[in-house]
């Protein structure tokens, strides 16, 4: 599943392509991937102009001139492919990124008045595209439960530490992966930031000092900013908005480097399971 840096990479790529375009028509294959009424589509999607593209955690929001927005969650195998004078793909790197579209994995097609189109493809059909009033988005269950954005300017190290207080009896990796604590952190960037902070993923939240939380806060923000700069990870199932694999994995210090030397101390990196996920650590730098 894409993490925050990958979705942010998608947002930035598509922002330069579809903002200002007017929607001519929409087609979809099932209501599961496009759970919207025909009346809402006719009234608030058709003839609407795209005015902005935002991101909250791992969800994209395409804001429309009608006061509605398209919320898009790519889930595990979703893609967004723009086809116009140029072609840009983002998401699961199967042949749909380069195929003639729509194809058998296309779930939603949005045609623009200039002849270009945006395709939502999803092999496993877990993703979705929802049309909602923009003003109501903060009130939906997902937005009410999701934690703050880790890269927001107003999100301080002190608030970061406070967010973990209700998870004091769990391990720090499980808490990092909890989207209600902090938004958008997945397995890759949890491992990378814990390695950077020299914290064992099985350490209980209650055992971390204020200084350790501040170090983890700084490491998490640094790792995510680098990942966005590099276009996200190339974690088998993700490419950036130009259809190229992200390059962050070329810079990973610990994730998927089991059996290799720790770049900090030279100790062999090990893989274990923490919080039900494959977890990579340096047993010397990250002692329990």
Image (spheres, rainbow, N blue to C red):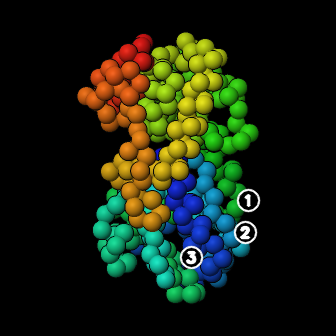
Q: Are marks 2 and 1 in contact (CB under 8 Å)?
A: yes
Say which mark, if any, is on residue 67.
2
Q: Nearer the viewer, residue 218 or 52?
A: 218
Q: Nearer the viewer, mark 3 or mark 2?
A: 2
Q: Total of numbered circles in the picture?
A: 3
Q: Position of residue 271 (x, y in %)?
A: 30, 27
Mark seen at residue 135: 1
Q: Residue at x 53, y 50 (%)?
A: 229
Upstream in sequence: badge 3 or badge 2 = 3
Q: Quadrant of the C terminus?
A: top left
User: What residue sits 55% from the left and 12% below the top?
Assistant: 207
102 w.r.t. 6: above or below: below
Would you say the residues marked 1 and 3 are in contact, meaning their CB atoms lie under 8 Å apart?
no
- Image quarter of residue 64: bottom right
What's the mark number on residue 38?
Answer: 3
Q: CA distance from mark 3 to mark 2?
A: 17 Å
Q: Position of residue 285 (x, y in %)?
A: 42, 18
- Which sits earlier in the primary sequence, circle 2 or circle 1? 2
The residue at 44%/22% (across/down) is 201
Helix, strand or loop under label 3:
helix
């Amino acid at each position: 599943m894409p993490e925050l840096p990958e979705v942010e990479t998608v947002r930035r790529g598509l922002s330069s392509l579809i903002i200002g375009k007017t929607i001519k028509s929409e087609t979809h294959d099932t209501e599961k991937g496009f759970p919207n009424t025909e009346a809402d589509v006719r009234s608030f999607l058709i003839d609407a102009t795209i005015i902005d593209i935002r991101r909250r955690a791992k969800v994209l929001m395409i804001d429309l001139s009608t006061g509605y927005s398209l919320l898009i969650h790519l889930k595990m195998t979703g893609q967004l492919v723009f086809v116009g004078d140029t072609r840009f793909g983002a998401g699961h790197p199967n042949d749909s990124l380069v195929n003639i579209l729509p194809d058998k994995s296309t779930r939603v097609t949005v045609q623009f008045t200039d002849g270009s189109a945006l395709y939502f493809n999803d092999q496993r059909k877990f993703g979705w595209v929802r049309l909602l009033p923009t003003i109501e988005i903060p009130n939906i269950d997902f937005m009410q439960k999701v934690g703050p954005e880790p890269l927001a300017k107003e999100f301080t190290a002190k608030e970061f530490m406070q967010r973990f207080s209700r998870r004091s009896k769990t391990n720090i990796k499980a808490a990092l992966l909890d989207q209600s604590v902090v938004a958008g952190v997945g397995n890759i960037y949890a491992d990378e930031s814990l390695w950077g902070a020299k914290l064992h993923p099985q350490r209980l939240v209650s055992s971390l000092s204020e200084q350790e939380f501040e170090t983890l806060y700084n490491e998490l923000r640094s790792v995510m900013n680098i990942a966005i700069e590099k276009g996200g990870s190339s974690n088998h199932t993700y490419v950036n908005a130009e259809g190229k694999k992200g390059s962050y994995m070329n810079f990973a210090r610990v994730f998927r480097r089991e059996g290799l030397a720790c770049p900090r101390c030279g100790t062999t990196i090990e893989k274990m399971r923490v919080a039900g996920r494959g977890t990579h650590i340096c047993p010397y730098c990250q002692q329990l």
